[in-house]
Structure formats: C-alpha cells, structure tokens
Amino acid sequence: MIWFIYQGAFPEILEKTKEDFFSNTIIILGECADIIHERIKDIPCITCPQKPEGSMFVMVKLNLSLLEDIDDDVELCMKLSKEESVIVLTGVAVGMKNWPRVTFAIDRPSLEDGLGRIKAFYQRHMLRRNKDFISDQFNAC
C-alpha cells in the first residue's frame, strides 16, 4: 500500500514547504476563479450561479435545451473529451445530474485554452435555430 508511505511523509513535506508557496497558490487559485467565472458567461450552455470561493473547482449548470445532440452531462463529458481533449467530471459522479464539475486548479494559459475549447465545442453542438439566429445577426451588421 504505497499511499501509506506518502501519507506518512505529508507532515514533513508540509513543514518544510515555505509559506510563500501557499500564498502564491492561493493567489493563483483566486485569479483562476475569476477567469472561470467570467469566461463561462461566454458559453451559453453552461452557467456558473456563484463565483467559486475556497475551492479548486466549480459546478456548472448544463442547459441541454441549447444543445443539438447532447442528452445529459455524461454524453457532454464524453464528447468534450473526445473532440476537444478537455476532461470535466460528470455531475452524475457526485450526485448532481447535468451539473458538470470543472476544475480551475491549473495554470492560467491552460485554463484559458480549455475554456476556449469548451466554447468551440458549444458552437459546434448548439441547436440549429441558435446557429441560424447568430448567423442572421452577423449578416445584419
């Protein structure tokens, strides 16, 4: 049981870790929480009802009525993984159907890239009537 060896090492690791590591980690997580909260607003099929505080992930509500060929959060996560190489946890896995869990405990450039991929995924899978509406709005300009 290798986990037992690691568990025994944690107190010493934490004791020897400099305080600035923890301070910097908290700052980075705060910045990434701001980014994910703002950028999710640009992806209509998911909403973040509250800005994350004190966590490294956010549960987002999936609006299936805006998607053409996605039946639930499991299908969303599978297709997102296959098409965009973005991994999010299904809400079903934590007892919250259609509320995928998205982590932001990564570096800022990777987070920005991942959110861009989720947006591109949405644009490919959005309901046809939404695509036509957006096209009409663009052509009217």
Image (cartoon, helix red, strand yellow):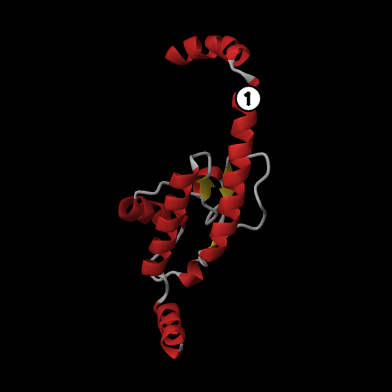
Looking at the picture, how far across and down is residue 68, in whole percent? 40, 71
How packed is label 1: few (under 14 Cα within 10 Å), some, or many (20 or more)? few
Instruction: Name the residue rendered at 45%, 46% in the picture.
Output: 109
Asked which secondary structure carries label 1, the reply is helix
Looking at the picture, how far across and down is residue 40, in whole percent? 54, 59
Q: Is residue 140 placed above or below 52 in the rendered structure?
A: below
Q: Is residue 43 placed above or below 52 in the rendered structure?
A: below
Instruction: Name the residue rendered at 50%, 71% in the picture.
Output: 65
Looking at the picture, how far across and down is residue 34, in whole percent? 61, 50
Type of amino acid at the residue the image marks with label 1: Asp
* Residue 52 seen in this snapshot: yes
Q: Nearer the viewer, residue 116 or 50?
A: 116
Looking at the picture, how far across and down is residue 112, in whole percent? 47, 51
* Residue 1 seen in this snapshot: no
Q: Is residue 95 placed above or below 83 in the rendered structure?
A: above
The residue singled out by tag 1 in the image is 20
Residue most toward the left? Answer: 82
Q: Nearer the viewer, residue 133 or 38?
A: 38
**Horizontal side, residue 46 vs residue 79: left or right:** right
**Horizontal side, residue 118 vs residue 95: left or right:** left
- Count of all numbered marks drawn on residues in the image: 1
Instruction: Name the residue rendered at 68%, 44% in the picture.
Output: 53
Examine the image and state in which quarter residue 140 appears: bottom left
Quarter the N terminus occupies: top left
Instruction: Name the residue rendered at 39%, 78% in the picture.
Output: 128
